[in-house]
Image (cartoon, rainbow, N blue to C red):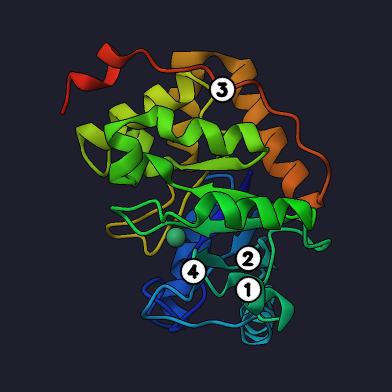
Amino acid sequence: MIDLHCHILPGIDDGANNLEDSIHMANVAVSSGITHILCTPHHNNGTYRNPKYDVIQHVAALQKELDNREIPLTLFEGQEVRITGELLQDIDQDNILFADIDDQYLLIEFPSNDVPAFTEKLFFELLSHEITPIIVHPERNSVFIDDPNKIIPFLEMGVLSQMTAPSYVGTFGKKIQKTAKIMLEHNLVHMVASDAHNIERRSFYMKEAYELMEKEFGYEKVESFKQVAKEIINGDTVKVPEPIGVKKNRFSLFK
Ligand code: FE
């Protein structure tokens, strides 16, 4: 299993506090069937700045620790980039890490309660530079919780979106779980990742999410999600199903 979103690097954001935590997370990941992790510390979220070359060094150091302990886990360098007006500049200054080696897929985080007005223009700019934004955990954003259809214009531009496994399993509560399920049902999310921060409160739940997805949506959906994760990490072209509009009564129920 590939995990495309994880705060496993020690001491650089609100994920693993120290090396011991990171090793603990790595062991839990491996025992749940995860083989590859894209390390995605927060960048530019108002609290943390983790520019490209710092992350590269941290990943190399942690990979060495894993290898020394013979923990069979491969790490890749990435970032969870908060959407800001300075993003293009940050890319030009070579501060940004993508999900793939060819710099095509970029994990983008919105503030929890907002979809900034400049988003569409910025996404248009990124797409015109052949960069595909991946919106992370839309099911946890209050704008999309209130109206999941608000993500559709972005998806129609060619933007992708990534669900957090624990959301779907229910760790963040019923409302977020329900939104995750609606988004899955309507092709509003295209892949799943852990966004694990630790093993106590914010663990992986990837295996559990895929199991639930298989039960609710069938084996093919699970396989297609796993395939998307593989394509992204390899920098290949991703083909995803068309988004389906959510009928109002499906989400007005829990307002
Ligand atoms: Fe995250």
Residue for badge 3 = 243
Q: Position of residue 119 (x, y in %)?
A: 51, 54
**Is residue 197 or residue 185 the one in the foreground?**
185
Give the distance between the C-alpha atoms of the residues marked 4 and 2, in whole angstroms. Answer: 37 Å
The type of residue carrying mark 1 is: Leu
- The CA distance from mark 2 to mark 3 is 39 Å
* Mark before the other along the chain sequence, 3 or 4: 4
Query: Where residue 66 is drawn, which disc sits there?
Result: 1
Q: Secondary structure at mark 4?
A: loop
Single out the mark in the foreground, 1 or 4.
Answer: 4
Q: Which amino acid type is marked by label 3? A: Pro
Q: From the top left corner, tell me how far across and down residue 112 is, in percent.
A: 31, 55
Q: Nearer the viewer, residue 169 or 246?
A: 246
Q: CA distance from mark 1 to mark 3?
A: 40 Å
Report the residue marked by disc 4.
Answer: 84
Secondary element at image label 3:
loop
Q: Position of residue 35 (x, y in %)?
A: 66, 52
- Answer yes or no: is residue 215 visible: no
Q: On the image, numbered disc 2 is attached to which residue?
A: 71
Q: Is residue 250 visible?
A: yes
